[in-house]
Amino acid sequence: MVCLGNICRSPTAEVVFRNKVRIENLEDFVFIDSAGTGSWHIGHPPDSRATEAALKRHYDMRDLRARQVTPGDIARFDYIFAMDRQNLSDLLHMSPPEHRHKISLFLHHGAGDTEEVPDPYYSGAEGFEHVLDLVEDASERLVKYIAAKHQLP
């Protein structure tokens, strides 16, 4: 899960998706992490507004710390989900051709017409709630997609 600073959208997606994986008893098969394309928040906890919104829905991301995506991540992970088109472009640019097929927009697995998870950083609480709504829907569908594609139990 990749966004710009790894303090709002991608940690939200990480904890929500991790919860969906746990509910489906797939923790032994799926490793989940998040990162940002930018470096300015490295080591920082998620934005307090994102943490508060997540806690209201029983997702706890207080132990997460921001990190920057690395070329090793591109090689290591089977799937790399960008939260928006700019991060998608940045990830494709840093990826060698043989790994570009792994990179896609996270919301391609959502139900609606929305393609990007909007950055809630400059919005109020409703922006963080909207991100959670989008991420929950996409995570539900994504866990089913991955389980079916890889024939997981």
Image (cartoon, rainbow, N blue to C red):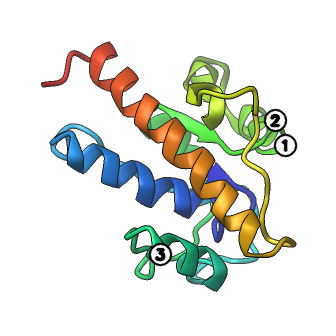
Residue at 44% in and 31% down: 142
Mark 3 vs mark 1, CA separation in Å:
29 Å
Q: Which residue is mark 1?
A: 86
Q: Which residue is mark 3?
A: 56
Q: Which residue is mark 2?
A: 89
Q: Earlier in the sequence, mark 2 or mark 3?
A: 3
Dot 2 and dot 1 residues touching (CB under 8 Å): yes
Q: Is residue 126 left or right of residue 80?
A: right
| Amino acid residing under circle 1 | Gln
Q: Tell me residue 64's x, y (percent).
A: 46, 75
Q: Is residue 17 left or right of residue 66?
A: left
Q: 126 or 131, which is in the foreground?
A: 126
Residue at 21% in and 15% down: 151
| Amino acid residing under circle 2 | Ser
Mark 2 vs mark 1, CA separation in Å:
5 Å
Residue 122's disc number: none
- In this rendering, the answer to whether 151 lies above or below 73 is above
Q: 107 or 28, which is in the foreground?
A: 107
Dot 3 and dot 1 residues touching (CB under 8 Å): no
Task: Write down the quadrant of residue 4 in the picture.
Answer: bottom right
Which of discs 2 and 3 lies nearer the camera? The answer is 3
Local crowd size for mark 1, using a 10 Å CA cut-off: few (<14), some (14–19), many (≥20): some
Q: Is residue 43 left or right of residue 60?
A: right
Residue at 74% in and 31% down: 92
| Residue 70 appearing in the image | no
Residue at 60% in and 27% down: 111
Task: Write down the quadrant of residue 43 in the picture.
Answer: bottom right
| Amino acid residing under circle 3 | Lys
Local crowd size for mark 3, using a 10 Å CA cut-off: few (<14), some (14–19), many (≥20): few
